[in-house]
Amino acid sequence: MDNEQIKKEISVRLEIEREVRKQLQNIENRNTEPVKSRWQWLESKLMLLVIGALLSGILVPTFQFTQEKIKWHRQNRYDSLERQLTSMRGSLKQFIAVHGLSAELYNLGSGALKSQSAAPNQVQFEDWQKEFNLLRKRRIGKNATFAATVFFFPKGSREQIRKAWNALLLSVQKLEALVEKILNNDSKNFIEVNGQQLTMNKIPIQLDVSLSEMNKTYNHVLKILRQQFQEVENESSKFR
Amino acid sequence: MKVQNFVNTLSVAVLSMFFCTVVPFAAADVGGGGGHPATPWRLEGPQSVFDLEQAKIQAARYQTLSISKEHTNDETENKTVLIEGVALSPLPTSIGDIAVNEFIGNTDSGEPTNISFSQIESFKIISKNKETITLLVTIWPDISPEELLQKKPTYTEISTGYRRNMVIHLNLKFADGRKKVLLGEWEDKIPLEELDVGTRCDFYEEDPYLIHPLKFWWAIPSVANDKEYPFRMMPLKR
């Protein structure tokens, strides 16, 4: 082996060694290099700026707006319930006034019945008739006023109120018919109400029966109205 | 001068005391007064036993039952549940049902018996099982129409006497298998089986303004004219 060949062989080995070192270096470098996350872009300053702008420019106002909207709805609901309560109070007042007139009607019939035993004169009859007509007129007016306020009560209860109210109207009409017959009574032996002949002994009892039925039906309507009033009041207190 | 002042002061004091004592009594009569007696015999009493018997049958239809709320499923704020014009009806209801105004059952000895609502003051549930309920019924006024017409008692006599207790066993269901329910004219209802043992139900605890004159069949003039008679007719003002 000549010198030239030895030199060449050494040079090849050195080349291989250098190559091996280079590859080893590469492998080492690859192991120590940190893993890049795909969310790393979020950490960039620009991204932080954009996110900050979004939070302060859109999310916070949206949150505040929603909160204001809820508050506004709440206030609106409370105001509307308060208005409803005021109207219901007015309706209740009208209803009690209606019954006051019915009670006056009973008193008129009862008083006339007492006086009839003392043979009243024509003037007395005319006075009763005038009073009766006035009461009837006022009662019709008050009835209409109350009937118009029923829609202030919760929707679900209106049908129940109307049903009970109609029962009351019926009992008051019965009383009214009886009182009218009493006031127009000239025979003094009997009166005819709804096809039934009532002797003078039975008239006061029939008057009491009408009063009792009227009281019961009135109480029934009042109970429903008060119950509804209580329910709306309870609901309104939730918004305070 | 001092004596005159003293006399004046004394007069004012006496007058004030007088008004303080009198006014409450006067105020109690404002708004319609005590009212006349609630009775089906206002101007004249019954002419015969038959009249009284008819009135007694009619009276059973106008009774109001009050039940202490703790023994019912009622969720309203009222302390008692009132069933106006109470009757015993089948549930579920169907067309042609006839409501009865009496308890039909058996006595302790097993004899069949019936007690009209017009003669019951109150009753108490003393026991219950799956099929029957046992009531301790206070019968008042325990007086027959004949005896009433003959003796003409006052209200004081009626209220202190003429009372007896009786045990009655009732079936919880009618013969057709439907539940027995205490049903009122406003459709308030309580099935007999829902009444707990110990419940007291009263026929004379209703609002004094809501009484029906025809329920007091026994309030003949001797009873109703007694100043102690508490049931009076008044227009409801509130």
Image (cartoon, coloured by chain):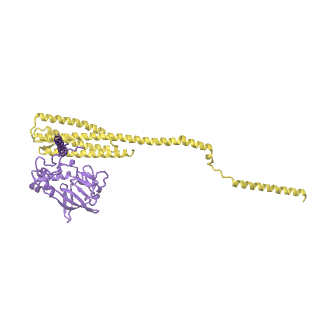
Q: Position of residue A96 (x, y in %)?
A: 25, 41
Image height check: is B205 above or below A99? below
Q: Identify the residue at image location x=50%, y=43%.
A: A63
Image height check: is A139 above or below B101? above
Q: Residue furthest right?
A: A2
Q: Position of residue A144 (x, y in %)?
A: 27, 37
Shade of chain B as shown in the rendered figure: purple
In the picture, the quarter occupied by the N terminus of chain A is bottom right
Q: Residue furthest front?
A: B1
Q: Is residue A4 left or right of residue B123?
A: right
Q: Position of residue B190 (x, y in %)?
A: 28, 55
Q: Is residue B132 left or right of residue B214?
A: right
Q: Position of residue B75 (x, y in %)?
A: 32, 52
Query: Can residue A225 be seen at all in this image of the molecule?
Result: yes
Q: Identify the residue at image location x=63%, y=48%.
A: A40
Query: Can residue A194 be seen at all in this image of the molecule?
Result: no
Of the pair B40 and B132, the residue shown nearer to us: B40
Chain that is coloured yellow in the picture: A
In the picture, the quarter occupied by the C terminus of chain A is top left
Of the pair A13 and A231, the residue shown nearer to us: A231
Quarter of the figure with residue A215? top left
Q: Residue furthest bottom?
A: B109
Image height check: is B108 above or below A17? below
Q: How many marks?
A: 0
